[in-house]
Image: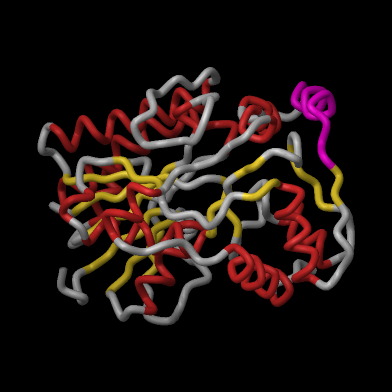
Amino acid sequence: MNERNLHVVLGTGPLGLAVARHLAARGDRVRAANRAGRADLPEGVEVVGADVALAVDAKRACAGAAVVYHCANPPYSMWSELHPPLMDAVIEGSAAAGSRLVFGDNLYAYGPVDGPLTEDLPYLATGPNGRIRARIAETLMRAHESGRVRATIGRGSDFFGPHAHLSTVGDRVFTRALEGKPAQVLGNPEVPHTATYIEDFARALVTLAEQDEALGEVWHVPNAETVTMRRFVQMVFEAAGHPARLRPAPRWGIAMAALFNPTLRAVKEQLYQSEGPWVVDSSKFERAFGWRATPLPEAIRATVAWFRDHARE
């Protein structure tokens, strides 16, 4: 792929920002699209205002693209309503441009699992958000199979890194560690839980865009070694220079708050991910493309440094 081909990133949440930064650092032409028409991105990245859930805006945002990265994500409590038309519009935009389409996805479609998560697991989600993630992934793969678009899916776990304030391993762990306050974690901190470094997630999506063999497939992006959430928190506090402190959020507390908070109702649906082992197997990607995730201590130190430099006032 010619390095001056246009790469279009839809959505400027943590993942979209990371993809755009990665591409810009390589010297690629990058356009990012969001509703606001502005974003914290390096000089030279074109930022356009567009509601890419509307086909007309998606086509305008994607015009001229060699690759489109679908990283747009509606509010958590509105996934069932907004994700299907968003995926439909993004497919239309990519098809009109004749681009490759790379979807940055999560793991919700699988539902509760017994054992490591691999790409060949069936979609057995038990709640509405998991079922909607399965639905839009299937929509995209059908569009690929029909020849409308050339698409691939990269899936990551709960992510941490720059701008990931709202992640389950965002402010509630990193900011609180820097403040010397107890980290707030969901579920059982003694079970292994894979976390994805956002910079590795972004690099993986770009890798998928460049490889013909990635098309028509689902890939779990590379992750560092899986540790318990207690150990993850300890590593964060060590990097922050404070003694580790941890406060698990009890299920009953989340259930009570969910009665009044639609976002927490969506969080409650996914508690199975943090109450038992949640170990993601990314060996398929590593074998195919030959690189591994950033070592966990290094990724945590870099994230602590970013949160320290971007402390919220």
In the image as oriented, which residue stretches furthest toward the left? 147
- The residue lying at 21 percent from left, 41 percent from top is 216
Q: Which one is nearer the viewer's eye here, 119 or 252?
A: 119
Tell me the magenta residue range: 248-259
Magenta part, dominant SS? helix
Residue 92 visible, this orientation: yes
Percent across and percent down for residue 151 are: 23, 45
- The residue lying at 89 percent from left, 58 percent from top is 181
Percent across and percent down for residue 280 are: 49, 42
- The residue lying at 66 percent from left, 56 percent from top is 165
Q: Is residue 12 above or below residue 282?
A: below
User: In the rendered structure, does residue 247 fall within the stretch colored magenta?
Assistant: no
Percent across and percent down for residue 302 are: 62, 72
Residue 51 visible, this orientation: no
**Left or right: 288 in relation to 108:** left
Q: If the image is split into quadrants, where does the N terminus sit? A: bottom left
The part of the image, by quadrant, that contains residue 272 is top right
The part of the image, by quadrant, that contains residue 298 is bottom right
The part of the image, by quadrant, that contains residue 265 is top right
